[in-house]
Amino acid sequence: MPAEKFEALPEAATSPLFSDLERRVIRYAEEMTRTVQVDAELVQALREDLGEPGLVQLTLSIAAANFTTRFNEALATDLEVRPATPAGRP
């Protein structure tokens, strides 16, 4: 995805950089993340856009991202990469 789209994400609902499908996908991810329950009309529109297998893949991808984020937040996981140390050294 081009950097300009990442920068435009906060305005995705109205930005001309995003297609209608991209807007629906972003809204779906936001609803899954923020409220868990997703508007039934949105689900049906995405089912028509992507087909059942595509909708399942999208849902799984969003759910996996939410799972790992919540897991790491709950355990305060340090995600910084540290250089390897030789065996026997702290």
Image: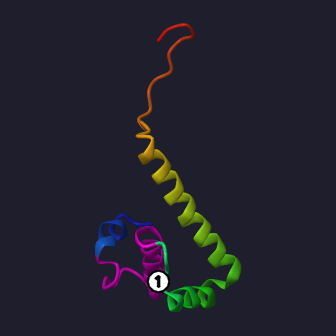
Residue at left offset 40%, top offset 66%? 2
Query: Could you say which is closer to the camera, residue 63 or residue 81?
Result: 63
Q: Residue furthest top?
A: 88
Q: Which residues are magenta?
A: 11-35
Say if 27 sits above or below 82 in the image: below
Residue 15 occupies which quadrant of the picture? bottom left
Q: Position of residue 48 (x, y in %)?
A: 62, 91
How many numbered tags mark residues here? 1
Of the pair 81 and 60, the residue shown nearer to us: 60
- Taking the spot 45% from the left edge, 66% from the top edge, the residue there is 1
SS state under label 1: helix
**Counting other residues with Cα less than 10 Å from the Cα at mark 1, is it few (<14), some (14-19), or many (20 or more)?**
some
Q: Relative to residue 40, is residue 55 depicted above or below?
A: above
The colour scheme applied to this rendered structure is rainbow
29 sits to left or right of 9? right
Identified at 29% across, 77% down, the residue is 11
Magenta-drawn stretch, dominant element (helix, strand or loop): helix
| Location of residue 45 in the rendering, given as x and y in whole percent from the top left corner | 55, 91
User: Residue flagged by tag 1: what amino acid is it?
Assistant: Arg
Q: Which residue is mark 1?
A: 24
Give the x, y percent position of residue 37: 49, 77
- In the rendering, at what x and y percent does residue 27 appear? 43, 79
> Could you say which is closer to the camera, residue 68 or residue 8?
68
Q: Is residue 72 magenta?
A: no
Toward the right, the furthest residue is 53
Instruction: Please tell me whether residue 88 is drawn above or below residue 23 in the rendered image.
Output: above
What residue is drawn where x is 58% and y is 90%? 44
